[in-house]
Amino acid sequence: MEVIQEKTQNGSAASEVDVHRREFLKKLGSGVFASLLMPILFKDNFAALADEALAQVDLPELPEPSPEEDPLVRMMRDLQRALKKPLEQRKWTMVIDLRKCVGCHACTVSCIAENKLPPGVMYRPVIEEEVGEYPNVHRRFIPRPCMQCENPPCTPVCPVNATYKRPDGVVVIDYNRCIGCRYCLTACPYNARTFDWGEYYTEDVGFLGLQPYEQVDTMEYGLDWKRPEGRSPVGNARKCHFCLHRIEKGLLPMCVVSCIGRATFFGDANDPDSLVSELIAQPNVMRLKEELGTRPKVYYLM
Amino acid sequence: MSHKDTGVVNQEVNAKSAAQVKDQMERDILAAIKKPKPVYWLGLLITITMTLIGAAAWAYQIKTGMGVAGIRNPVGWGVYITDFVFWVGIAHSGTLISAILFLFRARFRNRFNRSAEAMTVFAVMTAGLFPLIHLGRVWFFYWLFPYPTQRLLWVNFRSPLVWDVFAVSTYFTVSAIFWYIGLVPDIAILRRVRTGWQKLAYAFGSLGWKGTFKQWQHYNQIYKYLAALATPLVLSVHSVVSWDFAMGIIPGWHTTIFAPYFVAGAIFSGMAMVFTLVIPMRKFFRLEKYITVDDFEKAAKLLLFTGMIVGYAYIVEFCLAMYSGNPFERDQFIYRAVGDYAFTYWLMIACNVVTPLTLFVRKLRRNIKYLFIISFFVNIGMWLERFNIVVISLAHDFDPYAWGTYTPSIIEVAITVGSFGWFLTWFLLFSKTLPVLPITELKEEAE
C-alpha cells in the first residue's frame, strides 16, 4: 500500500490507473486460482464425512468362533474387524477357488437380483472354458467380477473424474458424475464394465409389458437410484463394486453369500488373520493378466 | 513474360492488360455468388432434409436412450466415434493447404485454400457434435469443460478425452480465425460491389478494411504468424485424437505408430474431400480458368503421397503385431484380415491403398473426372479405416468371452447421413455468400 500511495502522490494519473489495474489483476488471478483449487481442497473432507457416517452402523451379531463354523461366518467376523479400522487401512480382496466352482451361475443371478441389473449389464459372469482335446477334456468355470485393480486402467481415462479408486481399494463409479462416454469400458482389459443402455427385459413384449421387478430402485452405493425415470444409472457405465452397500452394513457381497460350493471368499487382505490372507498366501494362487500390470485384487485358486 | 527490351510504352500496355485481367478475375469469381439457380436450391433442400433426418434421429435417441444405437457390449464405441474421427480427419487438409503450403510458398494452394479452409471449419463443427451424440447423458456435456463450480466438478486432465476437448476446440478457433482473416480483403471487395442490406452486412464483416499500405502490412504479418501457429496444430490435433485409442490397452489400439499414421490418414482423407467438393464447384461456377488441371495434378500428388504413407502404416501395423510376440495383438490382426469384418478390411485396403496407386499414371492424374471418382473411393476407404480401428479392436479384444460383433442401427445410419447433410448445408451456404477463391491472392499472383 505504501508503494501505491507514493506513486499516486508523485506520479501522474496514468500510473495511478496502472497500479490499480495491477492490483485488480492480482486479486482476480488469485480468485480464479483459489476456485480452481477448491475441488482438490474439499475432496478429502467429503470422503472423511462419508467414512464417519459409515462407522455408526450397527453390525450383525455373530456366534462365538468355533473350528467347525461355516467359512461365511468367519468371513463376516473378518469383515467386522476390518470395518472397525479406518477406511484407508482396509484392502478388500476376493478369492475364487476354481477347483470348487461348478459353474452354476448362482453368483451371476444373485448379483443381478441384488443390484437390479437390466439387460446388457452384468457384473459377474461365469466364463466357461474347455480345456484339452477329446477325449481328455474337462471344463473350467471362471467367475469374473471386477478385479478392483490396484493400478486400474479404467480410472485415468474418465474425463469427468466420475470413476476412481476409493481409499479401501474399491474402484467405484459416481453415477451422478458419469456422463456416459464409455471410455472406461474400452479401457478395461477384463471387460468388467458394462453400459446401461436404458433397456428392460419385457418392455417390448406385448402381452407382458414392463414388469414391476424391472422398475425396482437399485440401492447401489447405499443410495436410492430411481431407474424408471430414465435417470442414473441409465446412461452410465456400471460395474461390480464388491457390494459396497452390503459391506458397509457388515454383510458379505451377494456373490459370496450365494455361492453353493463356498468357492468365493471375501475379506481384508491387510488383516493377517483373515481367511483371504490365508488363502492368497498359498502357492496355487493366480491373478488374471498379470502381464498388464493392473495388479488385480481378485485372486484365483488353481 | 519479359519486357526488358520493349520499353516504357509496352510496360504501360502490360499494366493495363494486367488490370483488365484482374477485373475479369474479380467478375468471374464474384459471378459464382450471384443469385442462385434452381439446382442450387434443390441441392440445399436435399442437404437440409438430410440434416433434419439426422437431428430427428438424435432427438429420438436422447428421448429413448442409447439403446436405440447398435452399440452393445463389448463394442461400446461404434459409428459415432468413427464419424468423429472421420470428420476431424476431413478438417485436416484445410489447414495443411492454407498454413503449411503457404509457408512453403506452394502456389497451387491459392486455388484450394478458401474452400479447404471453409471445409475445415465446417468439418470441425460436424466432428464436434459426435462426442456429444455418443454420450449416454448428453445433457451434462458441459462437465467436460474445466470451470469452477460449487458442485466441485472438475475434469480429469489425464483422460485423452479431455485432451480432445482442448485439441478440437483450439483447432476450431485457430482455423476459423485464420479463415476469417484471409477473407477480410475479399469481403471488402463484396462491400464495394453489393448494395442495400448486403452491403451493410459485408461492410460489417470487412472490419473497416480500406486496403491501405499499413493495413496490408499488418495483414501480411498476422497471416504469416497465424500460418505458423496453425502448422503445429495440423500435427497435434489428429495425434491427440489418435491417442484416444493408443492410450487404451486394447490390442489393435495400443501402438506408438498411431499419431503419425492418423495424421497422414487425416491429410489423405481431407485431400479427397477437397476433390469431392472443389471439382463440382469448379464446374458449376465455371472456374476452369482459375483452378487448372495443373493445380489438380499437384494436389493429386499430395493425395498419392499421403495415400502411400497410409498404406505403409497398414503394413507396419501387421509387422508390429507379428514380431511383437504378443498373442493378443497378433490374433487381433489375423482377425482383421479373415474375421467377421474381413469385408470392410479388404474394402478399406482396396479403396485406400490400391486405387490411389493408379495416380502414378500421369494421364489419370490429370483426368478431373477420374480424380472425382478416386476421391469417393478414398472417402469411403478412410471412413472404413476408422470403423475398422474402432470396432474390430473392441469386437475382438483379449479373451474369447469378451468377443462380440456390432452392426450399426438405423438411428446411427440416420445420424451419419445427417452429419453429411449438416456439413454440405454449411458448404452450400458458404459458396453463395463468400468468394470461393481468394480474389486478392489470385490478383497478387497475376502481377
Image: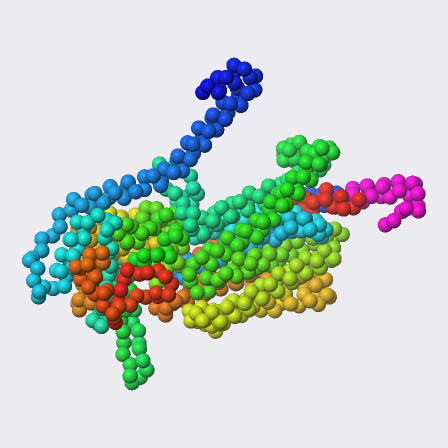
Q: Looking at the image, which is closer to me, B373 or B158?
A: B158
Say if the magenta span includes residue A113.
no
Instruction: Tell me residue A265's x, y (percent).
Output: 20, 63
Q: Quadrant of residue A296?
A: bottom left
| Left or right, B421 with reference to A173 | right
Residue A243 image-quadrant placement? bottom left
Viewer-proximal residue among B352 and B163: B163
Q: Main secondary structure of the magenta part?
A: helix
Q: Where are the magenta residues, as a range?
A: B1-24
Name the residue at 29% across, 83% down. Answer: A136
What residue occupies the far bottom of the structure in this picture? Answer: A135
Name the residue at 56% across, 57% down: B263
User: Is residue B402 something that shows in the picture?
Assistant: no
**Residue A186: percent from the left, percent from the top?**
40, 59
Left or right of A2 on screen, residue A231: left
Which quarter shows the C terminus of chain B?
top right
**Residue found at x 41% / y 67%:** B396
Camera-side residue of B415 and A289:
A289
Q: How is the image coloured?
A: rainbow
> Where in the figure is residue A85, as x and y percent of width and height?
19, 49
